[in-house]
Amino acid sequence: MTNQNATLNFSRWRGLPIPDQITIEQLLIIKTKLNLLWEAIACLIEIPQEHLSRLAQLLQIELPIEEILPFSNLSVDKNLLLESTADIPQLLAQVQGQTILVHNLAKQQQMLLRRAVGLIEQVNTYNTDLRQISLLKDYVEKFQNRFLVNSMVSPVYQKLYGDKLPIEQANKLAFKLLIELLFYSNNQGDRLLWSSLVQQYQ
């Protein structure tokens, strides 16, 4: 069980303020949005779990990486169990750790993100066939598959996006996430990302 005082100290140390009143449901929504950003990175480039674990250690995140990031081998039962049994300190530690990790991963992949966003602009401006751009084609296909699995597994996904998101809207979401990741890849991106996630609950 995560110690609540340690969680709050972690938040202040990172400069990630916690809203005075925040619920488990709100934290699960925040976690789902962070999961999507992580899924976008994972679909754009394969990142070994060992690298993620080393990065977490470097960032002094004490939680096991499996508690912070969703991996594709999680079963339906485990996903539901994580959502139904987590408490506020535990979820706070997870979403704060995930915010720091997502920001640093985006920062590490900033050049690739910039390239991908440039290609997205090309698709939108010149109506380029997505199938002609291998980077985006592979990314979108992976994202659609993972999003479908998550929407089947997680009640929070279903609440936010419905049981089935049309392919065109899923593609728009996939592109939007890459643009957001590029925005949050700057030096203050972790605070900007956290602020965008919690500001509606302030």
Image (cartoon, rainbow, N blue to C red):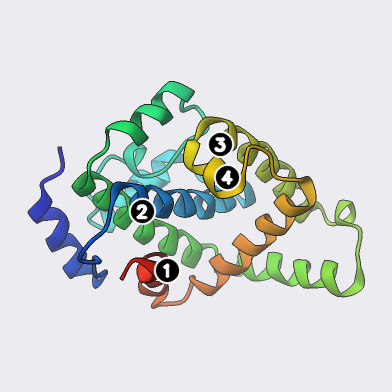
Which residue is at a point 84% across and 57% down the rendered structure image?
133
Residue placed most toward the observer, 145 or 132: 145
Determine contact: label 2, label 1, CB under 8 Å.
no
Q: Is residue 156 left or right of residue 56?
A: right
Residue drawn at (37%, 59%), measured in percent from left and top?
99
Residue highlighted by disc 2: 26
Q: Report the mark closest to the observer, 4 or 1.
A: 1
* Alpha carbons under labels 2 and 4: distance apart: 30 Å
Whole-number angstrom distance, CA of label 1 to CA of label 3: 22 Å
Residue occupied by mark 1? 193
- The amino acid sitting under disc 4 is Glu
For the question of whether residue 53 can be seen, the reply is yes
Q: Is residue 180 left or right of residue 89?
A: right
| Number of numbered discs on residues | 4
Quadrant showing the C terminus: bottom left
Q: Secondary structure at mark 4?
A: loop
Q: Earlier in the sequence, mark 3 or mark 2?
A: 2
Question: Badge 4 local density, few (<14 within 10 Å), some, or many (20+)?
Answer: few
Place of residue 31 in the rendered image (x, y in percent of width and height, measured from the top left): 40, 50
Q: Residue sitting at 27 percent across and 69 percent down?
A: 16
Question: Which callout, 2 or 1, points at the residue further toward the start of the chain?
Answer: 2
Badge 1 marks a residue whose secondary structure is helix
In terms of sequence position, does the residue under pointer 4 or pointer 1 come before the other?
4
Which label lies toward us, 3 or 2?
Answer: 2
**How much space separates mark 2 and mark 1, taking CA atoms?**
16 Å
- Three-letter amino acid code at the position of disc 1: Leu
The residue under label 4 is 46
The answer to whether the residue labelled 3 contacts the one labelled 4, judged by CB atoms less than 8 Å apart, is no
